[in-house]
Amino acid sequence: MDAPAAVPGAPERTLGICRAAMRFCASRGWAPVTEVRLPNGRRADILALLPNGGFAIIEVKSGARDFLSDAKWPEYRDYCDALYFAVDLEFPAGLLPGDAGLVVVDGMEAALLREAPPHPLAPSRRRALLHRFARQAAGRLAALSDPTGFAELRAALRAE
């Protein structure tokens, strides 16, 4: 008799949804970066630069409790042209607001169920966000080529 399949916990579930959502972004020609700190202090799960120069934020939700305990997601609208939620098949999609896009994940596959209504950013905010996006992405890329050096530098800056 086979053992029952393990049900992933919230961290594993969140990671799986995030990975599939990143693949979804790549399939659309978007350039996604995870865990991006926004100017208002919030952290977007995924901030994606779109081919037209716009930005999409994808908020990853691992379950109903995750969504219901998070009241900060409306604040992301001020920093994107389109807001999406990414959830898996187990998520009760009826909880999600209808004025946001919806990406549903099954394993490593993701499908767009609802396009996000556009709400264009002001040009000055887009420019500032593009600068922040580029600095974070470039910093992470540089850290991949010299992880020890960047870890030492971060530690030294914290000590000052």
Image (cartoon, rainbow, N blue to C red):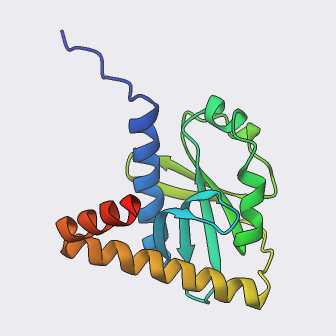
Q: Is residue 28 above or below residue 19?
A: below
Q: Is residue 87 above or below residue 152?
A: above
Residue drawn at 26 percent across, 63 percent down: 151
Q: Quadrant of the N terminus?
A: top left
Where residue 12 appears, as percent x and y from the top left, is 38, 37
**Residue 50 in view, yes or no:** no
Furthest residue toward top: 1
Question: Taking 116 as reference, is 34 left or right?
Answer: left
Residue drawn at 73 percent across, 48 percent down: 72
Residue sitting nearer the eye, 80 or 127: 127
Residue drawn at 53 percent across, 57 percent down: 111
Q: Quadrant of the C terminus?
A: bottom left
Which image quadrant is residue 121 in?
bottom right
Count of numbered circles on the image: 0
Where residue 33 appears, as percent x and y from the top left, is 46, 69
Question: Taking 122 as reference, is 34 left or right?
Answer: left
Question: Taking 73 as reference, is 147 left or right?
Answer: left
Where residue 79 appears, as percent x and y from the top left, is 71, 71
Which image quadrant is residue 50 in?
bottom right
Q: Is residue 63 above or below residue 39?
A: above
**Residue 120 in view, yes or no:** yes
Residue sitting nearer the eye, 46 or 151: 151
Q: Is residue 89 above or below residue 153?
A: above
Residue drawn at 63 percent across, 71 percent down: 56
Where residue 152 appears, as percent x and y from the top left, is 24, 64
Question: Taking 61 as reference, is 75 left or right?
Answer: right
